[in-house]
Image: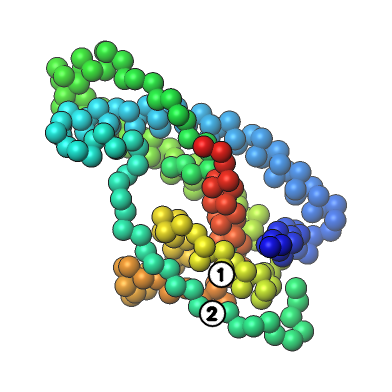
Amino acid sequence: MKNTSGSLFSNSIGAGLSDFKKERLKTLLQQGTIVLSPEFDEMLDPILALSRLQSQVRKRNHPSSPTNAAYSGDAGQVLHKKLKTAEIPKERTCMEEPKTAETPKERTEVPMVDDAVLFFLENDSLEFEEMVKKHSDELSATLGHMEKQLEELLDTVRSTYRPMTLIEKQQLRKLIQKLPPKNLDWVVQIIQHGKMAKAQSCDEIFVDLEKEDNKTLWRLYSYVKSVERATALPL
């Protein structure tokens, strides 16, 4: 079956810009990726180290828990929202043409926690747990700040995107419906970003892509494609 998703969503960036400015924008984005990638990579080891420390705390507090052996960094089972997207009308005439990290490849070898940490945990567990919590809070704050800055940058870039066409919205709806259930929570967060929460069932969210703004639509598309790329990575 021929994949038309790529051709449908092509040439999206730089609507209204001259060819020179459009190419300049693409170059700056590529340079930004080169600069930002190492910064995000540097966060991976601290996250894995914190995960190992938290695992040790859990094992000590719940030594007989059957879930500890299978608790490898996941936050456990989450009740995922069921997402319902509205049917988008068929094409109208004269129609002109939107880190757990999921994307990086997971490491298969996890270093053991050293003896000094185990000794500290056994002899002063309360202080150790407080230290782990403080480190977790600091790391979460750092990641939150990085995420906020990145989202602001991406929103600025998306403001230059051309309007998404009717056919593209229909295709986006199909792509969202094919997402694994665990990814639908992120879709809901993207749609509700900056909006007042509406009175809807906590387990079911109704989405009408026709009523979403252009930046949200392209943000949804970017997320769907990132999930596709992560799924395609070799294990």
Between 205 and 69, the one nearer to me in the picture = 69
Name which quarter of the figure residue 55 lies in.
Answer: top left
Give the left or right position of residue 135, taking residue 121 as reference: right
The N terminus, quarter of image: bottom right
What is the distance, in whole Å, between disc 1 and disc 2 at their CAs?
A: 8 Å
Query: Residue visible at 16% across and 19% down?
Result: 122
Q: Are marks 1 and 2 in contact (CB under 8 Å)?
A: yes
Instruction: Where is residue 97? Give x, y as percent.
Output: 75, 73
- Vertical arrangement, residue 214 with respect to residue 137, above or below: below
**Which residue ends up furthest to the front in the rendered image?**
1
Instruction: Where is residue 187? Give x, y as percent.
Output: 47, 61
Query: Residue visible at 75% across and 49% down?
Result: 25
Instruction: Where is residue 74? Give x, y as percent.
Output: 35, 42
Q: Residues within 10 Å of mark 2 (few under 14, many from 20)?
A: few
Between 65 and 214, the one nearer to me in the picture = 65
User: Is residue 219 among the parts visible in the rendering?
Assistant: no
Query: Residue visible at 37% across and 26% down?
Result: 49
Q: Which numbered dot is residue 87? A: 2
Look at the numbered disc 1 and give the secondary structure of its residue. Answer: helix
| Count of marks, rendered view | 2
Instruction: Where is residue 81? Give x, y as percent.
Output: 37, 64
- Vertical arrangement, residue 45 with respect to residue 68, above or below: above
Amino acid on which disc 2 is placed: Glu
Name which quarter of the figure residue 48 lies in.
Answer: top left
Sequence-wise first label, 1 or 2: 2
- Vertical arrangement, residue 102 with respect to residue 61, above or below: below
User: Is residue 88 among the parts visible in the rendering?
Assistant: yes
Q: Which numbered dot is residue 173? A: 1
Name which quarter of the figure residue 195 lies in.
Answer: bottom left
Query: Residue visible at 63% across and 55% down?
Result: 156
Amino acid on which disc 1 is placed: Arg
